[in-house]
Image (spheres, grey):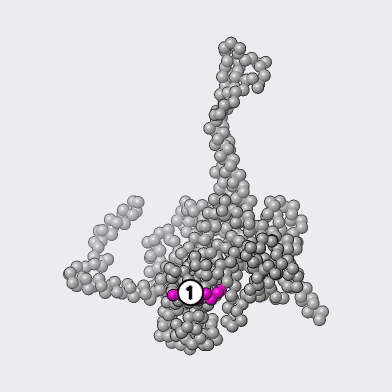
Amino acid sequence: MASRHAAFARVSRGRRVRRAGASLEGSLSTWTNSIVTQREAERQQERTSERAFDLYYNDAMAHGVLESLLVEAVGIGLTPQPSPRTEWLGRDAAWEEEFQTAALRVWEQQALDCRRFCDATRRLDYYGLQGLAYFNWKLLGIGVFQVMAKRRPLAPLSTCLLPIDPFRLVTPSDATSVEIYDGVEVDRDGEPVRVWIRQPGVTMLRPPKSQCAAFDVWDKETGLPRMLLVTDVRNVGEYRQDSILGPMISEIKHSNDLAEAAVVGAMIRNLYTMFVNDYGQGAVSRDTPWHQRVVETNKGTILLGSGKEKPTFFQHEAAPSRYTEMFSAIIDRIGMATGRGAENVVRKFQASYSASKASMEKADQFNDFEHRTLNLQWNQPFWSWILFEAALRGRLPVRADEFLANLYEYTHCEHLPQPFRQIDREKAAKADVMELGSHVTSYRTIYGRKGSDWRGELTQIAKEKRFIREIEAQYGVTMGASAIPESAWEENKENEDET
């Protein structure tokens, strides 16, 4: 009994949140009391999310940073390429081809239908929901989606996703007998078992259980999650991740202060200060008070002097000084916070080809890491739900009971991201030819990154080649690439080099 009590105490201590408020206050003084209670930690987490949300809508730099990350990491979307474990299932290659074709057909009908049946709110298609999951994860620390069965007329499947505002995740004020972190209830081992959602219309920051709705995370029949929680949990004492804009709040604030100072400096530089010698009647002298010698106008200041005073003109070119250097330093720090570098933040690749290529590859490493989280917590569960319903409806070459017993083997899939944007398209094309020849890549990977089925694309290419041969035989012409004179290739290459 003593050992069990000690183990539970260790787990409880491990789940205590250690969060400092210095990032919110901009002061190191709050670090002296960094061990805070769970309720205070959640309050600070919510404050950070609200400030990040405000930055996204009201600050151009924060908006651009998050949008660039969204376009870079998700872009046109991560496309599934089914790869069932054929050998594990004791199937042959013919069955694998049939299954892949049927699975892709079902997915396209459900995910890419212009009627958007995969979104319960009927606003987004599959790729739009995918982008929303990444957006909420990065901006608010977590993306929340509920898997639902909502039958509609003409809908191919009833499985759909309901996006939930992450701000509705709440820890009830009277939840004292269970452990709830950031609105996610966990068991003694830390496994999420239930999600608490604030009811519509409730404005209390910490409402009681009676004003909240609890939803089970896991489905008992399939073992799949019914609540998709897209986040990267790195602290056992919390569930929601920090906003990516959180560490940049002070940097962006400094950038705004610097921009305002630059605007004030530009206004000052447009003003003038003029010294005028007054020789007329009632001329000023050295004994004349200053308030009688200074004349303020809308565009500048006029100083009245006597005839024996030497005029001195004031220059404002130095206000403010070194704006470019200070702004570049802020961009460097924001680039470090995103992990992708300053060039990626400002979208200016002004270095050499090798340096720009290295910067883009470094950013792609972060994209791969984020793809893993998005695939495991959003793409793969939703893909599994779609195929499970398709199996129940007899739209896959497998029995429903057999599918459920071997769900992982049947739903194994790769979600390929968008194609990497190359600086030199000619080098990229040669690299693809070389990798295909050396068997380090496949047509499935190349076409999958473009969101296309490799079998369909190769079939289309074969049809086009056959049609070209028929046209050549009918009209007695040559339409292949070899028909273009070599001189034309060389001339085109010279023009490209000159450009």
Q: Is residue 401 above or below residue 154?
A: below
Dominant secondary-structure state across the stretch colored magenta: loop
**Which residue is at 35% across, 51% downward?**
499
Quarter of the image for residue 146 reads bottom right
Q: Is residue 234 visible?
A: no
Image coords of residue 430 (percent x, y): 38, 65
Image coords of residue 464 (percent x, y): 29, 71
Q: How many marks?
A: 1
Q: Badge 1 is on which residue? A: 152
Q: Residues within 10 Å of mark 1 (few under 14, many from 20)?
A: few
Horizontal relation, residue 32 to residue 183: left or right:
right
**Which residue is at 74% across, 68% downward?**
174
**Amino acid type, mark 1:** Arg
Camera-nearest residue between 115 and 18: 115
Camera-nearest residue between 15 and 322: 15
Quarter of the image for residue 178 reads bottom right
